[in-house]
Image: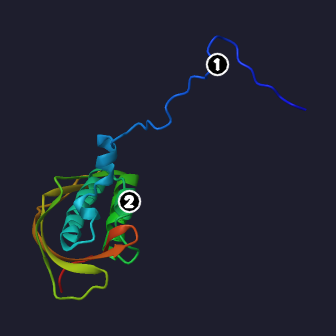
Amino acid sequence: MVLALTSCGDDPEPQVADPTATPTSSPSPSESAAAEKEPWEEKTDDGAVAFVEHWLSTFNEMQSTGETVAFRELATTECETCANFVSLADETYSGGGRIQSDGWRLKSASPTSLDVPDGHQLALSVRQMPQKVFETATAEPESFPGGTVTFLATVVWTNDGWRMDSWEFPG
């Protein structure tokens, strides 16, 4: 069996676009921005310090909203203090309470001499703003004056980026 192809019209040559012309495109601003990493997403010494600042910002958000998911994701399972912070927020907010504060701010960070595989231990000076904790919706607040406190933070680099491995008072 033979198939014959015919065309109708006066032009026997089909009109086809030039196959050599290729449209060019450049990444959109949103694509370029998505490719850029935040400082705390870099596996560098400065990235470790930037991570501590990000961790504190996420901690402050958790304290003011009671939302703990983002904060949990920034800690390893070894960080007992992190788990205690989450428990305090969960207990307070599940009972109708709240935490009022302007948060904690990093004043300074310097590496210690402790060798941490895939990480750093940092001596931190943190400014804690005054805080009121309302354990329930009707409870009188427990007030804390705030001040500058020294902590030791151990951060480790994982497949998912920096994670808080411990947060403690120097002993």
- Mark 1 Cα shell of 10 Å, populated few (<14), some (14-19), many (≥20): few
For this orientation, the residue located farthest to the right is 1
Relative placement, left or right, of 70 versus 170 is right
Q: Earlier in the sequence, mark 2 or mark 1?
A: 1
User: Can residue 95 be seen at all in this image of the molecule?
Assistant: no
Horizontal placement of 47 versus 75: left or right? left
* Residue 118, percent from left and from top: 31, 81
Task: Give 126 or 93, whichever is nearer the viewer.
Answer: 126
Element marked by disc 1: loop
Q: Which residue in the structure is indicated by mark 2?
A: 91
**Can I make out residue 78 in this image?**
yes
Q: CA distance from mark 2 to mark 1?
A: 81 Å
Front position among marks 2 and 1: 1
Q: Is residue 101 above or below residue 29?
A: below
Q: Quadrant of the C terminus?
A: bottom left
**Numbered circle sitting on residue 12:** 1
Residue 42, position in %: x, y? 27, 66
Instruction: Please give the name of the residue rendered at 30% of the width and 47% of the height, measured from the top-left corner.
Output: 32
Q: Quadrant of residue 9?
A: top right
* Three-letter amino acid code at the position of disc 1: Pro
Q: Give the camera-side residue of 67 and 76.
A: 76
Numbered tag placed on residue 99 in the rendering:
none
